[in-house]
Image: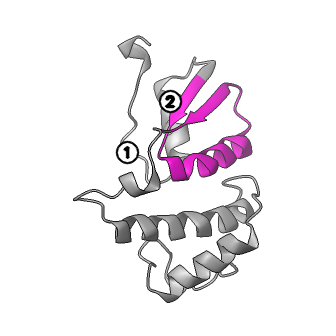
Amino acid sequence: MPAENIAIEEEARNIGENIGLTRKIFPQAQRIIWVTKPQTQRRVRASLDARALDIVSTVTAPDHSFDAQPTDSHSMHDLLCELVGDTWRVAAYPDLGFMVEQEIPEQVREAFNLLVSEGFTAHLPRNVLTLEDR
């Protein structure tokens, strides 16, 4: 891949903004490979599908295990908070038009509730305690 065809978009505050800003960087692109974290691939795909872009989009992520993701600057606690926030967004964002609806299995809902009850809430809006709080 030629270097001029690679961009790291660093201004977005969410996936939808990231998609929009990246399209501004490459307005003529007919194919885009979206590289993200393993756990956000589903959110990216659902966000792309909601936008009905006129391009071919591939979503991918580095191939590494969950246990390899915590670092000195992003702890396991931070990672779990992020996953809780991502799960809530998968439930809430279709109602806002930000992504297409995704099925959330009951075991994921149970894990979400357990993690929220244990305080992994740093990536949730205030007053959110369940997936139904949206």
Picture colour scheme? one colour
In percent of the image, x 65 and y 62: which residue is there?
90
Observer-nearest of 112 and 94: 112
Callout 2: 10 Å neighbours few (<14), some, many (20+)?
few
Residue 48 lies in the magenta-colored region: yes
Mark sitting on residue 109: none
What residue sits right under mark 2 in the picture? 24
Q: Where is 53 relative to 129, above or below? A: above
Is any part of residue 39 visible from this angle? yes
Q: Residue furthest top?
A: 2
Observer-nearest of 10 and 105: 105
- Residue 106: percent from left, percent from top: 74, 74
Residue 47 lies in the magenta-colored region: yes
Give the quarter of the figure containing the N terminus. top left
Q: Residue furthest left?
A: 72
The magenta segment: 32-61
**Rounded to the nearest whole Å, what is the CA distance between mark 2 and mark 1?**
12 Å
Give the quarter of the figure containing the C terminus. bottom right
Q: Amino acid at mark 1?
A: Glu
State left or right for residue 11 relative to residue 60: left
- Residue 27: percent from left, percent from top: 55, 22
What residue sits right under mark 1 in the picture? 11
Callout 1: 10 Å neighbours few (<14), some, many (20+)?
few
In percent of the image, x 62 and y 30: which residue is there?
58
- Residue 39: percent from left, percent from top: 53, 53
Q: Amino acid at mark 2?
A: Lys
